[in-house]
């Protein structure tokens, strides 16, 4: 394992430049140096060559839905309580109407929210939610693909009421993208929309500053067989990359690097077992074809817990955190044998 430390002033300068470009004639909302995503096939093929058994493609979401991995995540985090509920499909139109009104007027349509909540509560699914969204219990909420953490109305705070849930979903670009994607796929497949809402018991100990993202490319990218046993963690990045790493629990830098990499390999073994024992052949095949990434949270006792499983690859929307899918392509796709652990710190930190 090799540890790479990026001086924080480089990350800060890049972040400032990205923000500046948002106000130009050709705005961009992503750094071109860190946390890159959505590259072209031409970009990455020059670094990671294709072969008869491996090509660069954008992965479908089929294998990465949170509910698919829910049993494994619950076991890893030892959750006190977790629920998956269905939002009636007809409410998607109301939620999109709320979102569109907010975007158009820059004022949140709370009257529309009240109508949506009233309708939801009157349904069978809503009645089942009443004991959970009682204004007392605290929940971390998310849709199957993403959480509404970008909502300006407490997206990173716990939810306790129907109003909390609707406002956060309707004011989140991430959640809106999930609804749009599900609407399109349902139309293409001639089926009804399926909107799943996950409620996990709120855990104050969960802190993105102690989370890390591990990357697992398709084995065929490095010329290995398309087999579960060939899946490997090739690199690990600090997840909360826009800010310098804070070594939690009094650890030195060397300790998180060792603990997180060892823990990530342990989680990967659990993922492999889960794939072999509980995943369908189709989903396992997609994971082997496209690879995946997963986020882990470092605990005080030095263990890590699985947070979620995400898509991976240069053409995907998966952010590379402190890596760059192209310039770090050989490391990320496993063409270089040494596993790399990357963080950013103030000069003299660690």
Image (tube, grey):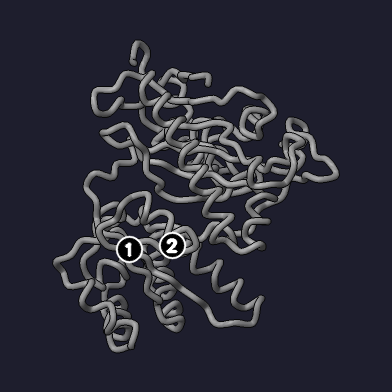
- Specify whether residue 51 is in view: yes
Dot 2 falls on a residue whose secondary structure is helix
Q: Which residue is mark 2?
A: 175
- Specify whether residue 115 is in view: no
As drawn, is 86 to the left or to the right of 318?
left
Among the two numbered marks 2 and 1 on one chain, the one whose residue lies closer to the N terminus: 1
Residue 242: % across, % down: 40, 33
**Which residue lies at the image location 46% right of the left edge and 81% below the top edge?**
89
Label 2, label 1: how far apart the Cα atoms are:
8 Å
In the rendering, which numbered label is found on residue 168? 1
Observer-nearest of 32 and 91:
91
In the rendering, which numbered label is found on residue 109? none
Dot 1 falls on a residue whose secondary structure is helix
Answer whether labels 2 and 1 touch (C-beta < 8 Å): yes
As drawn, is 331 to the left or to the right of 98?
right
Quick one: which residue is furthest to the right in this view?
Answer: 52
């Amino acid at each position: 394992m090799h540890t790479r430390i990026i001086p924080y002033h480089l990350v800060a300068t890049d972040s400032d430049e990205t923000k500046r470009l948002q106000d130009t004639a050709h705005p961009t909302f992503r750094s071109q140096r860190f946390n890159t995503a959505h590259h072209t096939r031409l970009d990455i093929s020059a670094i990671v060559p294709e072969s008869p058994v491996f090509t660069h493609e954008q992965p479908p979401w089929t294998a990465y839905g949170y509910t698919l991995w829910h049993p494994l995540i619950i076991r890893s985090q030892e959750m006190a309580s977790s629920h998956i509920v269905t939002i009636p499909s007809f409410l998607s139109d109301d939620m999109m109407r709320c979102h569109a009104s907010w975007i158009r007027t820059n004022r949140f349509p709370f009257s529309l929210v009240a109508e949506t909540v009233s309708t939801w509560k009157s349904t069978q699914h809503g009645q089942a939610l009443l004991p959970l969204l009682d204004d007392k219990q605290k929940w971390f909420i998310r849709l199957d693909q993403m959480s509404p953490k970008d909502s300006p109305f407490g997206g990173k705070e716990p939810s306790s009421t129907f109003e909390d849930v609707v406002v956060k979903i309707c004011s989140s670009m991430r959640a809106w993208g999930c609804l749009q994607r599900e609407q399109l796929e349902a139309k293409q497949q001639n089926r009804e929309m399926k909107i799943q809402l996950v409620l996990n018991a709120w855990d104050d100990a969960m802190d993105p500053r102690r989370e890390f993202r591990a990357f697992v490319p398709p084995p065929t990218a490095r010329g290995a067989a398309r087999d579960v046993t060939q899946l490997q963690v090739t690199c690990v990045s600090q997840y909360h990359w826009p800010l310098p790493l804070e070594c939690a629990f009094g650890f030195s830098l060397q300790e998180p690097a060792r603990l997180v990499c060892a823990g990530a390999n342990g989680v990967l073994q659990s993922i492999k077992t889960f794939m072999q024992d509980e995943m369908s052949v189709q989903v396992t095949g997609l994971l082997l074809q496209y690879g995946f990434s997963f986020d882990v949270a470092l605990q005080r006792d030095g263990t890590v817990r699985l947070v979620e499983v995400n898509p991976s690859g240069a053409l995907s929307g998966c952010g590379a955190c402190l890596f760059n899918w192209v310039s770090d392509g050989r490391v990320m796709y496993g063409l270089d044998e040494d596993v790399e652990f990357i963080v950013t710190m103030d000069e003299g930190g660690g």
